[in-house]
Image (cartoon, rainbow, N blue to C red):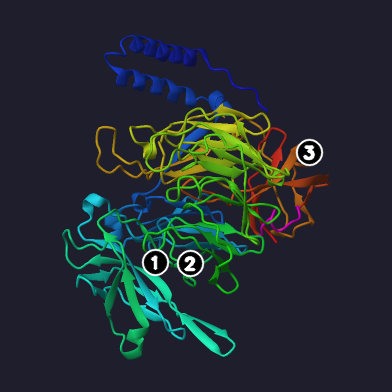
C-alpha cells in the first residue's frame, strides 16, 4: 500500500485559514448560522478533495446525465450486460400517471451511454427479480393512485361480483353499472373485471356448484354525500350478459364510503430482455399486486408475495412464476401473509427467512414478526431477540458475506406509517444455529429510515443516506456514509455524499467496484414549504478507499463465462501472488430499501501457475442459478474489475 501523501505547507495554511474562519464564525453563529454552516462545508469540501483524505475515506462524484435521460428512479437493477436499468413508471407523480407517461432508462457505466426504453404500463411500485438466464421479471405496478379523504368526492369501495357458472369465465368492462336493489343508487366500476368460473364438486352422483367471487372497485355515479353503503346489499348489473348468463352473475357490497382510497395494483407482468433491451410481455399474475416482493427460488422459479390488489386490499395469496412456460400459477397452500415489500431471503436449506423489514402496508405487529418460512409445509418459526422490533418499517436488511455463514443483518427503520420515530439499531441473526436469535450489533451513527446497504467485494457493507424522519420531513436527510466491518462489528465513517436521499432511493455495486446511488423522494420541498417535494434526479457514484489507496488492482485476463456448482474452474491473472480471496456476488435488484437478490459467496481458492483455481460451492439454494460478478481481491482488500459468470 502506498504511504498516505503529506499535505504541502501551502495546503496546511489554507486549511488553517478556513478553520480559523469557522472558529470566528462560530463565535457569532447565533447571528448568522447559515454562514457558519457554509464555511464548514467549504472546509470539508477542501479536505475531501485531498488524495490523502480520499485514500482513507473514498470519494463521491456526480454522474453527468443529460436532461432528456433524467428520471425518477424508483427501481434499479444491474443487468448481466453491465448496464443499469432504472424504472420510474409514473415516478410517484399522479399527474404523470394520468397522462400515461411511463419511463425506463438504461445506463451503461462502461461507455456513459444512456437510452430510454419504451415502458408499456405503470411499473411504479411493482416487484422484480432475475431469472437464471439474466432476464429481469418485472411484475405488478400501479392501476390507480391513492386519494386522501379530503379529496374523495364520490362514495367508493369494493363490489363483490359472483360467478355461479363453473364452465365459463366472464369479463365485465370498465364502467359496468351496478344498481342497488335496496336504494336504487348507482355505481360504476373503475376497472375491467375478469370473473373466474365457479367451482364444481362431484361426490358420487351428486354435483354441487359454488360461486367464485371477484372484487371490483366502484364509485358512485354522482358526487356528494349520502351515496354510501353501510350494510350488505344486492345489486343488479347493467352489462351485455343476457339470459342464463345474467342469472349466473350477481353482485353485492356492504361498505361503500368516503374514506381514503388506497393505491391499487395491476397484474401485468414482463421479462426485460437485457440483450434486446426490450420488455417482453408474459402472462398476467394470478393477483394484481402493488408493492410485492419477488423472491428467487432454488429451482429457478420466482414467488410473488404480498402487495395491494386491484381494490387496494392486502394480498394474502402467494403465486409462482414458471420461466419455461412464462406463466404465473397460484400456490394455494402458501397462506402466510406478509406486509408489503417483505424482505425474504432464500436460505441454504431452501426455506425463506423474513428479516422483519418491510415497507408500508400490513398489520402493525402480527404480520411483521421475523421468522423462518417453510414454504413446503407453510409453517412459520418466529425468531426472538430483535431490539426495537416496532421500528422495522423502511429498515434495510441483507445477507452478510459470505453467504455460507447464513447471517442476516437488519439496519435502522422506523415506526409504522408516517411516524417521525426511527432507530439507529442494527442486529444480526445466525441462521446456521439450531435456535437462531437476533443479537444487537453496533449502532448506526443516527436513527435512520431508508438506509441503503450494499455488499462489497471485501466482505464489508457500504451504508449511506436515509433520513431520521418520514420521507426526509423537517429537513432530516442524513448526508452520511459509513462502512460496516462484520468481523469487528464497527462502522467507519467515510466521505459524505452531497445529495440527500430518503424514500424511493437505491444504491448498487457496479462491476468496477464502485457504488452508485439514485433517487430520493422527499415529502415536502422544505421544512417551511409544504408543497410536494422535488424528486432527486441527480446520480452520485462513490469510489471506495480500496480503489484510491495506491494498491495495485488484480486483473482477470481469461476464464470461463459459465460454471457449474461444485466444480473447479481456472481464471488467468498475472496477479495470482497477491490474490487473497475470490467472491461471487449476485447483482442487485433493489427498490424501497428492499434488495433480496444480494448475496456474496466465498470461493475456495488455490493458486495455480498463471492464475487461480476457484471451486464453486454446492447447493441450489445457497447458489441460485444465474449471473454473478466474480471478483478477485488482494490482501489490501482491493478487488479486480468483475468478470460475469453464469452459474448453474
Residue 194: % across, % down: 39, 75
Residue carrying label 1: 120
Residue 302 visible:
yes
Q: Assess whether residue 619 is covered by the magenta stretch.
A: yes
Whether residue 330 is situated above or below residue 203 in the rendered picture: above
Is 48 in front, or is 582?
Answer: 582
| Mark 2 or mark 3: whose residue is earlier in sequence | 2
- Asked whether the beta carbons under mark 1 and mark 2 sit within 8 Å of each other, the answer is yes
Is 392 in front, or is 381?
Answer: 381
Main SS category, magenta section: loop
- Mark toward the viewer: 3 or 1: 1
Q: Assess whether residue 614 is covered by the magenta stretch.
A: no
Residue carrying label 2: 270
Residue 94: % across, % down: 29, 55
The 10 Å Cα crowd at callout 1, few under 14, some 14 to 19, many 20 or more, is some
CA–CA distance in space, label 3 to label 1? 51 Å
Residue 279: % across, % down: 46, 66
Is 240 in front, or is 460?
Answer: 240
Give the secondary structure at mark 2: strand
Residue 622: % across, % down: 70, 53
Describe residue 312's horizontal placement relative to residue 48 as left or right.
left
Give the magenta range: 616-625
Give the secondary structure at mark 3: helix
Whether residue 325 is situated above or below residue 404 in the rendered picture: below
CA–CA distance in space, label 2 to label 3? 46 Å
Residue at x 51%, y 12% (from the top left corner): 9
Describe residue 23's horizontal placement relative to residue 238 as left or right.
right
Residue at x 59%, y 61% (from the top left corner): 134
Amino acid at each position: 500500500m502506498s504511504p498516505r501523501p503529506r499535505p504541502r505547507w501551502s495546503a496546511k495554511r489554507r486549511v488553517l485559514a478556513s478553520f480559523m474562519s469557522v472558529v470566528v464564525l462560530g463565535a457569532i453563529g447565533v447571528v448568522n448560522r447559515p454562514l457558519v454552516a457554509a464555511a464548514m462545508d467549504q472546509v470539508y469540501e477542501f479536505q475531501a478533495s485531498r488524495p490523502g483524505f480520499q485514500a482513507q475515506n473514498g470519494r463521491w462524484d456526480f454522474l453527468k446525465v443529460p436532461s432528456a435521460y433524467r428520471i425518477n428512479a424508483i427501481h434499479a437493477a444491474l443487468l448481466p450486460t453491465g448496464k443499469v436499468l432504472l424504472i420510474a413508471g409514473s415516478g410517484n407523480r399522479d399527474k404523470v400517471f394520468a397522462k400515461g407517461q411511463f419511463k425506463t432508462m438504461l445506463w451503461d457505466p462502461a461507455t456513459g451511454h444512456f437510452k430510454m426504453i419504451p415502458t408499456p404500463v405503470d411499473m411504479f411500485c411493482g416487484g422484480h427479480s432475475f431469472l437464471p438466464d439474466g432476464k429481469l421479471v418485472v411484475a405488478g405496478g400501479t392501476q390507480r393512485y391513492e386519494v386522501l379523504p379530503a379529496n374523495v368526492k364520490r362514495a367508493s369501495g369494493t363490489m363483490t361480483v359472483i360467478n355461479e357458472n363453473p364452465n365459463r369465465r366472464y369479463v365485465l368492462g370498465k364502467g359496468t353499472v351496478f344498481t342497488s336493489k335496496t336504494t336504487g343508487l348507482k355505481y360504476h366500476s373503475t376497472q375491467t373485471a375478469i370473473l373466474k368460473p365457479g367451482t364444481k364438486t362431484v361426490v358420487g352422483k351428486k354435483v354441487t356448484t359454488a360461486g367464485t367471487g371477484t372484487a371490483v372497485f366502484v364509485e358512485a355515479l354522482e358526487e356528494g354525500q349520502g351515496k354510501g353503503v353501510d350494510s350488505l346489499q344486492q345489486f343488479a348489473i347493467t352489462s351485455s350478459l343476457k339470459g342464463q348468463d345474467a342469472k349466473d352473475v350477481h353482485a353485492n357490497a356492504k361498505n361503500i364510503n368516503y374514506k381514503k382510497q388506497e393505491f391499487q395494483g395491476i397484474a401485468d407482468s414482463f421479462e426485460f430482455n437485457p440483450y434486446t433491451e426490450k420488455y417482453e410481455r408474459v402472462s398476467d399474475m394470478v393477483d394484481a399486486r402493488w408493492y410485492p416482493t419477488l423472491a428467487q427460488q432454488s429451482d429457478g422459479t420466482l414467488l410473488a408475495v404480498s402487495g395491494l390488489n386491484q381494490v387496494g386490499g392486502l394480498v394474502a395469496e402467494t403465486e409462482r412464476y414458471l420461466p419455461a412456460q412464462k406463466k404465473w400459477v397460484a400456490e394455494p397452500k402458501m397462506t402466510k401473509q406478509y406486509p408489503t415489500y417483505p424482505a425474504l431471503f432464500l436460505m441454504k436449506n431452501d426455506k425463506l427467512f423474513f428479516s422483519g423489514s418491510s415497507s408500508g402496508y400490513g398489520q402493525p405487529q402480527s404480520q411483521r414478526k421475523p421468522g423462518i418460512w417453510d414454504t413446503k409445509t407453510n409453517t412459520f418459526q418466529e425468531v426472538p431477540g430483535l431490539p426495537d422490533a416496532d421500528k422495522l418499517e423502511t429498515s434495510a436488511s441483507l445477507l452478510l458475506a459470505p453467504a455460507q455463514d447464513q447471517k442476516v443483518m437488519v439496519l435502522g427503520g422506523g415506526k409504522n406509517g408516517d411516524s417521525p420515530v426511527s432507530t439507529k439499531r442494527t442486529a444480526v441473526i445466525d441462521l446456521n444455529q439450531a435456535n437462531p436469535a437476533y443479537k444487537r450489533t453496533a449502532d448506526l451513527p443516527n436513527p435512520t429510515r431508508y438506509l441503503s446497504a450494499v455488499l462489497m467485494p471485501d466482505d464489508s457493507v457500504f451504508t449511506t443516506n436515509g433520513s431520521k424522519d418520514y420521507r426526509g420531513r423537517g429537513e432530516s436527510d442524513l448526508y452520511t456514509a459509513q462502512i460496516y466491518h462484520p468481523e469487528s462489528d464497527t462502522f467507519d465513517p467515510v466521505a459524505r455524499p452531497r445529495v440527500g436521499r430518503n424514500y424511493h432511493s437505491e444504491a448498487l455495486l457496479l462491476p468496477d467496484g464502485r457504488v452508485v446511488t439514485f433517487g430520493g423522494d422527499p415529502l415536502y420541498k422544505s421544512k417551511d414549504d409544504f408543497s410536494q417535494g422535488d424528486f432527486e434526479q441527480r446520480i452520485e457514484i462513490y469510489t471506495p478507499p480500496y480503489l484510491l489507496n495506491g494498491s495495485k488492482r488484480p486483473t482477470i485476463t481469461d476464464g470461463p463465462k459459465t460454471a457449474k456448482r461444485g466444480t473447479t474452474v481456472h481464471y488467468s491473472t498475472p496477479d495470482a501472488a497477491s490474490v487473497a480471496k475470490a467472491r461471487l456476488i449476485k447483482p442487485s435488484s433493489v427498490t424501497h430499501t428492499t434488495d433480496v437478490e444480494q448475496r456474496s459467496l466465498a470461493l475456495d481458492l488455490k493458486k495455480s501457475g498463471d492464475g487461480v483455481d476457484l471451486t464453486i460451492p454446492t447447493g441450489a439454494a445457497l447458489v441460485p442459478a444465474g449471473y454473478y460478478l466474480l471478483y478477485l481481491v488482494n490482501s489490501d482488500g482491493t478487488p479486480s474489475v468483475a468478470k460475469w459468470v453464469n452459474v448453474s
